[in-house]
Amino acid sequence: MEKDTRSELELVNFSSERALLSAISTCLDTEQGFSVATLNLDHIVKLRRNPEFSAAYRAHTHVVADGNPIVWLSHLAGRREVRLAPGSELIAPLVALAAGKRAPIALLGSTEPVLRAAAERLQVDHPGLEVVACLAPAFGFDPTGASADDLLDQIADAGARICFLALGAPKQEILAARGQARHAHIGFVSIGAGLDFIAGHQTRAPVWVRRLAMEWLWRMLTSPRRLARRYLDCALILPGLAAAALAARPRNGSAKP
């Protein structure tokens, strides 16, 4: 197999939510599986430190830009078509698509109370939606172990066509790549804390904060202990990413419009 030489920014191969939804619609119509990842700076930090995560990410079929820095850096590299597509904002349109096509979904991750609340909310918001499995892995879950295969098989046996993974990076992306290889007809979408937002167990930044591209600051102020080191690591890689983006201008890849 040829080595994947794409830079982290070049992993973004779908430029917008609209492009992604069109592609996923085709996958559902043709009974093809897929895996969706949403690239942000924290993921890039982890990609550089974790070879297993990097390999799994590069196996994903659909990657969008989750975070304004990824969008800005992509534009700096000459890829002006790249638009913001946060993972938490992809859930509703993907679920609407699934409901419209009578494609059953599964929810995996978080906790049982969150899964139940999220499933109920989604079914209220999207009449006709079928949630066929809600699975909360035990603490310390290994996405590469036998228990991971058991969960993936349960999802397949339940008849799910799309599985939303709320395990956080890198676990959810590693499991998505494993699931895609094991059950090629299922789509896997990594959504981080998306189910917690839907269930009301976590609160996103207000819309006006997001429009100012300041959601990172809002999150930092609400969870300083958890996020301070993460954001420092992200800040440290920005200069190198900007330099690489400028250098990549003549040879950058294209995201699907």
Image (cartoon, helix red, strand yellow):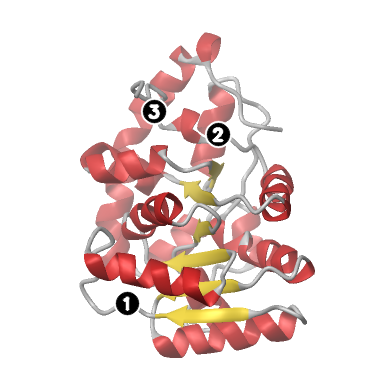
Which residue is more in the foreground, 183 or 229? 183
Local crowd at mark 1 within 10 Å, few (<14), some, or many (≥20)?
some
Locate the N terminus and report the quarter of the image it occupies.
top left
> Which percent across, then down, holds residue 91?
62, 65
Which residue is more in the foreground, 57 or 72? 57
Residue position marked by numbered label 1 in the rendering:
137
Describe the element under mark 3 as helix, strand or loop: helix
> Which percent across, then down, holds residue 21?
70, 51
Residue 82 vs 148, above or below: the answer is: above
Query: Which residue is located at x 58 percent, y 83 percent?
Result: 119
Residue 79 vs 236, above or below: the answer is: above
Residue 160: quadrant of the picture: bottom right
Q: Is residue 77 visible?
A: yes
Residue position marked by numbered label 3 in the rendering:
241
Could you tell whether 235 is left or right of 251 in the image? left
Gap in angstroms between the C-alphas marked 3 and 2: 11 Å
Amino acid at pointer 3: Leu
Amino acid at pointer 2: Trp
In the image, farthest residue toward the top: 250
Query: Which residue is located at x 39 percent, y 43 percent?
Result: 57
Residue position marked by numbered label 2 in the rendering:
72
Could you tell whether 135 is left or right of 97 in the image? left
Which residue is more in the foreground, 169 or 227? 169
Q: Is residue 203 visible?
A: no
> Which percent across, then down, holds residue 216?
46, 56
